[in-house]
Image (cartoon, helix red, strand yellow):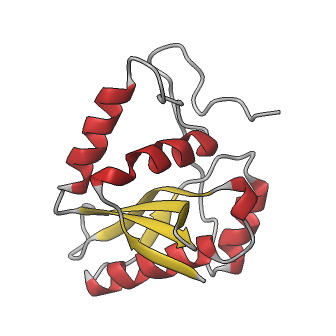
Amino acid sequence: MIAVRTAGPEDWPAVASLLAELGRPDVRGTPDEERAHALFRSYLERPDAVALLAEDEGRLIGFCDLEFRSRLNFAREQAWIPDLVVAEEARSRGAGAALLKRAEELAREGDCWGMTLESANWRTRAHAFYVREGWSDPGHSFVKSLTGEPWPPPPRS
């Protein structure tokens, strides 16, 4: 049975692993890990954000963070999901749907006018999932690297 709960500081190793699966820089065991861990701890303290985890029999298999942001000319906030990932071996078993459901509940409780997220072009399986969950694809997202490193990173082989 998949359960969704709020993340805590002790969940960092699992979150770092899941974010690496999403294509984020893998900071585990690098000089950047402590800084990334500190950023995660400070993220958990933000009043305008929440980090959620999906568990299956005590094993952390999914992560979703949710932020509430103001948009010009909107009287209510918008909910934004910066990250949603389910461990590859646990996909198609309901964890992603459970995370999205909880995020939507929190957005509704926060009186948000809508929700948004971005997904890399190469993640076509994720796109089909979002459409099945009632999301639409109304636009494009554009990125410009300021470091010379490609972002998002090229798809894994």
* Residue in the picture at 57% in, 74% down: 57
- Relative to 73, 32 lies left or right: right
Q: Position of residue 37 (x, y in %)?
A: 32, 37
Quadrant showing the C terminus: top right
Q: Quadrant of residue 78?
A: bottom left
Relative to 24, say whether 46 is above or below: below
Front one among 137 and 2: 2
Q: Position of residue 27 (x, y in %)?
A: 47, 28
* Identity of the residue furthest to the right in this view: 157
Relative to 9, say whether 92 is above or below: below
* Residue in the picture at 45% in, 20% down: 30
* Residue in the picture at 34% in, 80% down: 106
Q: Quadrant of residue 153?
A: top right
Q: Position of residue 24 (x, y in %)?
A: 54, 37
- Relative to 89, 17 lies left or right: left
Relative to 148, say whether 153 is above or below: below
Q: Position of residue 19 (x, y in %)?
A: 53, 44
- Relative to 126, 3 lies left or right: left
* Residue in the picture at 72% in, 54% down: 88
Quadrant showing the N terminus: bottom right
Q: Quadrant of residue 112?
A: bottom left
Front one among 38 and 46: 38
On the question of residue 48 being in view, the answer is yes
